[in-house]
Amino acid sequence: MFDKRYYYLLKIQYLGYRFHGWQKQPDVKTVHLMIDRTLKFILKDVRFKTLGAGRTDAMVSANEAALELFIYNEPILDFEAFLELFNHNLPQDIRALSIKEVDKEFNVIKDSKLKEYHYVFSEGQKNHPFCASILTTILEPLDIELMKEGAKLFTGTYNFKTYCYKATHKGEYKRTIESSEIIGNDLYTASFFPENSYIFKVIGKGFMRNQIRLMFGCLIKLGRGEVTLDFIKETLKDDSTEVMDYIAPASGLILHSVNFE
């Protein structure tokens, strides 16, 4: 018997602090695992498959992530009721935002999209422990104005091999970053947040393993006076052999949005 397949784009958000990243792994709790468990419970005997638009590392959060849901033979008839049931059964640190039907040509991984990442941080002081899940505290004072200059240097098309974790000689490291900047944080707030905090905001079509955390690690070193603006320029040249030796903590990184063109 021929199985008819239905295609849906789901947008979700999650706090990554207690998860071992997105991708399913043996014997650990991941975001994808919890989503599939919940779908299996609410869809009962209906066959389905899910595919994420990308992976996030352990402790990385998402304000808006995307996944494709394939359902066989029995379509979703009431999106509002589906979202209500899905959210009722998901863990409290995962929430479904929206669902829409897409055609069979849509591919959540291969279709062109822009991803916007935020790295939230503060400097120069010890913060309330409740901040730890989404804000990284750099205890040393940092030269924020110099870091703002450094962040802008990443905008454009460059060789980002220096900013790829465990890069090899066989990879393709040319990437285009549409925007890279450090701005004041007025987006993520709470009564226990420090008076001043910042966002390293990066927009691009594709990122390599740990790329943004390595880029921000370099900016931390810049803010500490350990490297210079010229150093960053050199790392982006085609013949660069630099290997970034400092990766920023995961818990400050948030996938802010995924927009399909």
Image (cartoon, rainbow, N blue to C red):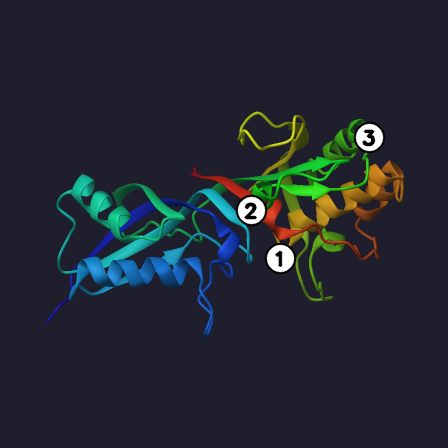
Comparing 170 with 124, the one in front is: 124
Q: Which residue is mark 2?
A: 133
Q: Which residue is mark 1?
A: 209
- Secondary-structure class at tag 3: helix
Q: Which residue is mark 3?
A: 146
Tell me if I can see residue 103 in this picture: no
How far apart are the alpha carbons under marks 2 and 3?
26 Å
Q: Amino acid at mark 1?
A: Arg
Between disc 2 and disc 3, whose residue precedes? 2
How far apart are the alpha carbons under marks 1 and 2?
21 Å
Comparing 174 with 68, the one in front is: 68
Is residue 216 left or right of 92 when viewed as pictured? right
**Comparing marks 1 and 3, which lies closer to the viewer?**
3
Place of residue 165 in the rendered image (x, y in percent of width and height, measured from the top left): 69, 60
- Secondary-structure class at tag 1: loop
Q: Which residue is rendered at x = 46% and y = 44% of the image?
A: 112
Q: Amino acid at mark 3?
A: Leu
Place of residue 234 in the rendered image (x, y in percent of width and height, measured from the top left): 85, 45
Q: Residues within 10 Å of mark 2 (few under 14, many from 20)?
A: some
How far apart are the alpha carbons under marks 1 and 3?
26 Å
**Comparing marks 2 and 3, which lies closer to the viewer?**
2
